[in-house]
Amino acid sequence: MSISIGELARLTGVKVPTIRYYEGVGLLPTPARTEGRQRRFGADEVARLNFIRHSRELGFEVADIRELLTLSEQPERSCGEVDAIARRHVENIDRRIGRLVALRAELQRSLDRCARGTVEECRVIEVLGYGDDRV
């Protein structure tokens, strides 16, 4: 299999600029090139890019994906390090959920206290900091 970057994008659902970015940050190896300097990719790159895409969809950061890719290339190792990365990620998600719940509650309180009058009386605008203190 030898495909272009456009075909790789189509097969994986990852946009061409994102593929180039992943090359630049080292998540994808530098691809082989034709005499005309066109990037060529094989089945390994398709699989790797699908792994990266799915990891990003789950919210993993680039550094964690890099580490997961490295670990995936060592199948004989214990999965303890993989579990630790996933556990850390779940903890981060839980913290973000907590912050989002608090943000939602604050916004809902603002809406509940809204007089439904004019913008100058709007509680949401006031909470955001544009009350009477406009410069």
Image (tube, grey):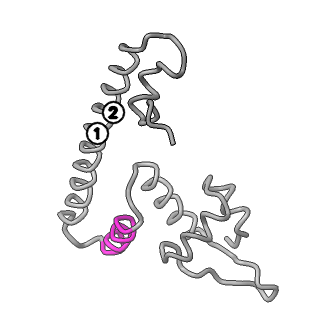
Q: Quadrant of residue 133?
A: top left
Left/right placement of residue 20 relative to residue 111 reads right
Does the stretch in magenta take in 13? no
Where in the figure is residue 41, as x and y percent of width and height? 65, 73
Residue 10, above or below 97: below
Residue 15, above or below 108: below
Left/right placement of residue 128 relative to residue 46 reads left
Write the start and end of the magenta stretch as one range: 63-74
Q: Main secondary structure of the magenta part?
A: helix
Instruction: Report the disc number at residue 103.
Output: 2
Name the residue located 52 percent from the left edge and 73 percent from the top edge: 28
Name the residue located 76 percent from the left edge and 85 percent from the top edge: 37
Q: Within 10 angstroms of label 1, few (less than 14), some, or many (20 or more) residues?
A: few
Instruction: Report the disc number at residue 99.
Output: 1
- Name, please, the residue furthest toward the right: 36
Where in the figure is residue 93, as x and y percent of width and height? 29, 45
Query: Amino acid under label 2?
Result: Leu
Left/right placement of residue 66 relative to residue 40 reads left
Name the residue located 28 percent from the left edge and 32 percent from the top edge: 102
Where in the figure is residue 5, as x and y percent of width and height? 70, 68
Q: Within 10 angstroms of label 2, few (less than 14), some, or many (20 or more) residues?
A: few
Does the stretch in magenta take in 70? yes
Q: Secondary structure at mark 1?
A: helix
Q: CA distance from mark 2 to mark 1?
A: 6 Å
